[in-house]
Image: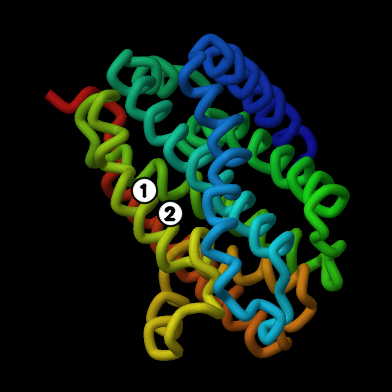
Amino acid sequence: MNTLVLAPAGRRLRALARAELTLLGRNRSAVATALLVPLALPFSVRPALDGMNLERSGLNAGTVMLTAAIGFSFLFSVYTGLVGAFVARREELVLKRLRTGELGDTEILAGTALPAACLGLAQSLVLTLGCVLFLDAKAPRAPYLTVLGVLAGLALCAALAALTASFTRTVESAQVTALPLVFVSMMGSGIAIPAAALPDRLASVCALLPLSPAVRLVSGGFTGRLGATEALASVAIALAWLVAAVFAVRRWFRWEPRR
């Protein structure tokens, strides 16, 4: 019985994801941002790494740049791209029309987010391979933590994008409403600045930011220096943010244009 129920839902989800992927491919600026920014920005943090004692934390320049690249992929390939996509589909009445069919609300949001999430996942794999081969980044010592961190980051970014879209009036303003989370995550979640380089008191506060647990799991998977208690704490924080974001989306997400 469950198989009979899930099969049509899977087909509807794939059809919506294919349509969203087609629309994404037609938006050249979104594609350029999603593909090029996560590849280019990590090199901007390289000069700042020369003055840091990374070896004390079990890090090297390649590992830090790889973690930064995956974090930038979360922010620009998934989060900011999806904020614009959700707002555009809402303002064009696409979401309203989809709700009149067989698709449920969760299916609509998941199908819209799926191409961006898959792009972020593919980027993470390519970046990992490239940094291991060319930037002296070591292969993950605890790959299950890295995989868990990537999946947590993708899910959180999709949920937070839907939440941000709830308070965004136009596609043009989506870049502005997405900026606070982007800036805070870059500075405090271990993306542009390694968490190990922050003062202890500030690091303990920044560890509670939405993307900090995912980035910490990714980095800990490469270094192998994230203990079981720390890993469980990171998973718990990530789950708490995800539950809160999903609850907020269910309550405040707008399906019709904000006029």
Crowdedness of circle 2 by 10 Å Cα count: few (<14), some, many (20+)? some
> Which residue corresponds to the image point at 56% horizontal and 51% vertical from the top-left?
155
Quarter of image, res 125: top right
Q: Which mark is residue 231?
A: none
* Amino acid type, residue under disc 1 in the picture: Arg
Query: Horizontally, is 92 left or right of 108 in the view?
Result: left
Q: Secondary structure at mark 1?
A: helix
Place of residue 225 in the rendered image (x, y in percent of width and height, measured from the top left): 74, 83
> Relative to 177, does residue 186 appear above or below in the rendering?
below
Query: Horizontally, is 118 left or right of 210 in the view?
Result: right
User: From mark 1 to mark 2, how far is it between C-alphas?
Assistant: 6 Å
Crowdedness of circle 1 by 10 Å Cα count: few (<14), some, many (20+)? few
> Which residue corresponds to the image point at 30% horizontal and 29% vertical from the top-left?
255
Q: Quadrant of the image for the N terminus?
A: top right
> Relative to 70, does residue 76 appear above or below in the rendering?
above
Q: Do the numbered discs 1 and 2 sit on residues whose CB atoms are within 8 Å?
A: yes
Residue occupied by mark 1: 250
Residue occupied by mark 2: 246
* Amino acid type, residue under disc 2 in the picture: Val
Name the foreground residue: 76 vs 159. Answer: 76
